[in-house]
């Protein structure tokens, strides 16, 4: 009989936490990867690192103060957030803003889509190893931010929406300046589009990673450019025709293949559409006064509930607002696109390489910076060491 | 290396950098950028509406010191003091004020190690009772 | 093409009450225990590529001693939202989970459980501290209940 002297444990899987912290963007999260060699077998998505209780906070503040609180849910897409909330209030109040205000709202939201998509494309380039392209895209994104400053008064926090209209008007000078900027940015975007299409490295890294089939995309409630990259034609702008989207011509961009590359291409397509929409709006702006007098707006709201949805740069964003009369909302429910895209998307990582995780996560357009760092547990030696995620691809165990 | 790349490199040598040497060079901002705002004490009627509506609770209503002149309409002799560390520059206060009392500027350089608030600026809009500022 | 009207029609046997929410979302109230049947019926009748579950939302009504749960389904193939609404008793809010029928319910169910304490029977992933910080969730407080004191 053999006596057991040594117990040898063979590690079945390596657990790699990716994340969690970076509060600057919307959702700091932790992806717990279980990898067998380089291949991922399971992913747990851990959240809760930056829950600020905004839904509760809105219940404690008045409807109008909430407009500004809600603008701070997300820095990048603050105009769409406030637009969605303000429209929910308008549905309850039965207010219809003047046509000029509707056009200007769409203008601010499309400028936001422009800079948001440029950001995620820049980050995609960075994750694929192209820091210079990242810098280039960010440089040109700054011009779009400038046009947002011209329109709304600040480059990030628009605070542009108000019940019954927008908060400042636009004049001839500003119009022509924004048109100028847009023209310049369009040329640059064409150039970057060509790089994304032709560059060998980008193509190798993005193609065939994180492929999502259309049925899966819907079953898992993924939204925005992610489902459109899987060939599903869904867009709240078409579906609800809110604000001026009913009047402004645009196309819904879809790609069939459903990998990270398709999602990047959807975003490029949407950049062109946004540019055309901005141009259309600035040349077809209806006359009238879009700015309501904030002192004359009703203080108290009738009993009622409404459910507004908006196509944010990252996908369908919805607000449910219920009022029980009085000056404070009874319940505000915010469902951001990233919640669906990130929590439900764990299945896409399975059977992919560790090195592709950033690319896949990046193509969902979440909080990117939170995954700059990973902890590897080497079970054989029982030591933990940290490497930036970018170098993970080169780690050999 | 591809020819497109070489063109881009040569161009890169000759163009001016897009970044600027702040604070030696100032950032160009819009004249109607939402920057530091303060109440004009010649107009303010002390209704406190701006303090109620401020989403960041940045405004405290404060007594106007006795030596300063306050308009008759401001019976309670109070005025809003904005704490710029809390303020998020949404300009809700500016738009709800019933008498348009706020003066707006595009001043954005507010970083400081001491408390920055608007009382000095607001008080400078009115005069002291016994002549002179 | 299924219009708004017969959207409610084919779910008729489950509908207790039906009305619209602004702006023209169809609301149907159903029995909480029938929620799984409603979703299977939905997937039988509608093309799988025509709808997705957008949100799960819960609201607390302490004075009525009820918790209301809404499932917002975006039937984009037919250009409408369907709101499936059910009421649960406040002391014992249990509803069958639909996560195996609609995997996209995961995020919504986890969130609603953590913030409001609705238990989704059959969902093994439920855990506290999904969103709520540990100091609150360890005291067994559900922050979105009106009497939570948070
Ligand atoms: S700008 Fe906004 S945050 Fe600042 S004091 Fe006025 S209301 Fe308050
Ligand atoms: S709202 Fe205007 S008048 Fe009223 S306290 Fe504020 S600054 Fe003064």
Image (spheres, rainbow, N blue to C red):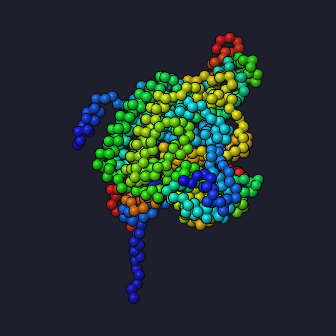
Q: Residue at 50% x, 41% y: name it.
A: A76
- Quadrant of image for the N terminus of chain A: bottom left
Which of the 4 image quarters holds residue B49?
top right
Which is nearer the eye, A396 or A131? A131
Is B84 situated above or below A361?
A: above
Is C139 situated above or below A330?
A: below
Residue A295: x and y, percent? 68, 29
- Quadrant of image for the C terminus of chain A: bottom left
Residue lying farthest front? C1
Left or right placement of residue B66 versus residue A387 in this view? right
Residue A224: x and y, percent? 48, 48
Left or right placement of residue B66 versus residue B11 in this view? right
Residue A251: x and y, percent? 44, 42
Residue lying farthest top? B131
Left or right placement of residue B66 versus residue A316 in this view? right
Residue A249: x and y, percent? 47, 37
Is C49 situated above or below A67?
A: below
Which of the 4 image quarters holds residue A190?
top left
Whether residue B20 appears in this view of the structure is yes
Which is nearer the eye, A215 or A177? A215
What is the count of numbered marks? 0
Q: Residue at 61% x, 33% y: name it.
A: A97
Which is nearer the eye, B130 or B20? B20
Q: Residue at 65% x, 22% y: name it.
A: B101
Whether residue C139 appears in this view of the structure is no
Q: Residue at 70% x, 12% y: name it.
A: B130
């Amino acid at each position: 009989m053999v006596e057991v002297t040594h117990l040898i444990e063979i590690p079945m899987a390596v657990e790699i936490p990716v994340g969690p912290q970076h509060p600057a963007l919307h959702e700091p999260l932790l992806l717990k990867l279980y990898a067998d060699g380089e291949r991922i077998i399971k992913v747990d998505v851990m959240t809760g690192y930056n829950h600020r209780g905004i839904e509760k906070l809105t219940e404690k503040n008045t409807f109008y103060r909430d407009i500004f609180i809600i603008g701070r849910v997300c820095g990048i897409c603050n105009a769409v957030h406030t637009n969605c909330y303000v429209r929910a209030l308008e549905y309850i109040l039965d207010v219809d803003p003047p046509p000029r205000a509707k056009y200007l709202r769409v203008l601010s939201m499309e400028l936001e889509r422009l800079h948001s998509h440029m950001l995620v494309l820049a980050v995609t380039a960075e994750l694929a190893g192209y820091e210079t392209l990242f810098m280039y895209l960010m440089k040109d994104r700054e011009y779009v931010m400038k046009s947002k400053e011209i329109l709304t008064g600040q480059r990030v926090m628009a605070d542009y929406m108000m019940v019954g209209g927008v908060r400042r008007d636009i004049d001839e000078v500003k119009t022509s300046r924004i048109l100028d900027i847009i023209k310049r940015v369009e040329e640059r975007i064409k150039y970057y589009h060509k790089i994304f299409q032709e560059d060998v490295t980008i193509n190798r890294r993005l193609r065939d990673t994180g492929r999502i089939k259309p049925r899966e995309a819907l079953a898992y409630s993924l939204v925005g450019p992610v489902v459109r990259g899987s060939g599903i034609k869904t867009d709240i702008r078409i579906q609800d025709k809110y604000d001026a989207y009913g009047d402004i011509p645009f196309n819904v961009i879809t790609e069939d293949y459903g990998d990270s590359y398709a999602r990047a291409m959807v975003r490029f397509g949407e950049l062109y559409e946004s540019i055309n929409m901005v141009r259309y709006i600035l040349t077809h702006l209806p006359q009238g006064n879009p700015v309501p007098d904030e002192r004359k707006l009703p203080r108290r709201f009738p009993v009622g509930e409404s459910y507004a949805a908006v196509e944010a740069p990252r996908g369908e964003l919805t607000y449910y607002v219920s009022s029980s009369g009085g000056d404070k909302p009874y319940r505000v429910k915010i469902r951001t696109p990233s919640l669906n895209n990130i929590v439900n998307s764990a299945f896409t990582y399975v059977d992919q390489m560790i090195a592709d995780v950033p690319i896949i996560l990046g193509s969902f357009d979440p909080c990117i910076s939170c995954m700059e760092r990973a902890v590897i547990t080497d079970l054989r030696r029982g030591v933990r060491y940290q490497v930036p995620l970018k170098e993970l691809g080169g780690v050999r165990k | 290396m591809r020819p497109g790349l070489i063109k881009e490199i040569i161009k890169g040598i000759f163009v001016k950098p897009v970044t600027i040497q702040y604070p030696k060079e100032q950032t160009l901002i819009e004249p109607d950028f939402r920057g530091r705002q303060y109440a004009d004490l010649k107009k303010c009627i002390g209704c406190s509406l701006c303090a109620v509506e401020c989403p960041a609770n940045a405004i405290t209503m404060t007594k106007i010191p006795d030596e300063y002149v306050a308009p008759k309409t401001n019976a309670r002799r109070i005025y809003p003091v904005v704490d710029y560390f809390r303020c998020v520059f949404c300009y809700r206060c500016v738009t709800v004020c019933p008498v348009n009392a706020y003066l707006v500027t595009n001043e954005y350089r507010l970083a400081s190690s001491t408390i920055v608030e608007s009382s000095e600026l607001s008080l400078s809009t009115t005069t002291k009772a016994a002549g002179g500022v | 093409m299924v219009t708004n009207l017969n959207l409610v029609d084919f779910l008729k046997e489950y509908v207790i009450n039906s009305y619209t929410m602004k702006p023209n979302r169809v609301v149907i109230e159903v029995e909480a225990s029938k929620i799984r049947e409603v979703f299977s019926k939905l997937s039988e009748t509608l093309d799988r590529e025509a709808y997705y579950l957008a949100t799960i939302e819960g609201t607390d009504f302490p004075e009525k001693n009820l918790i209301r749960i809404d499932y917002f389904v975006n039937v984009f193939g037919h250009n409408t939202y369907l709101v499936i609404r059910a009421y649960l008793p406040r002391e014992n809010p249990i509803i069958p989970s639909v996560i195996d029928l609609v995997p996209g319910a995961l995020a919504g169910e986890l969130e609603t459980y953590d913030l409001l304490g609705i238990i989704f029977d059959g969902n093994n992933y439920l855990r506290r501290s999904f969103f709520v910080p540990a100091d609150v969730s360890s005291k067994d407080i559900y922050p979105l209940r009106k009497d939570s004191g948070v």
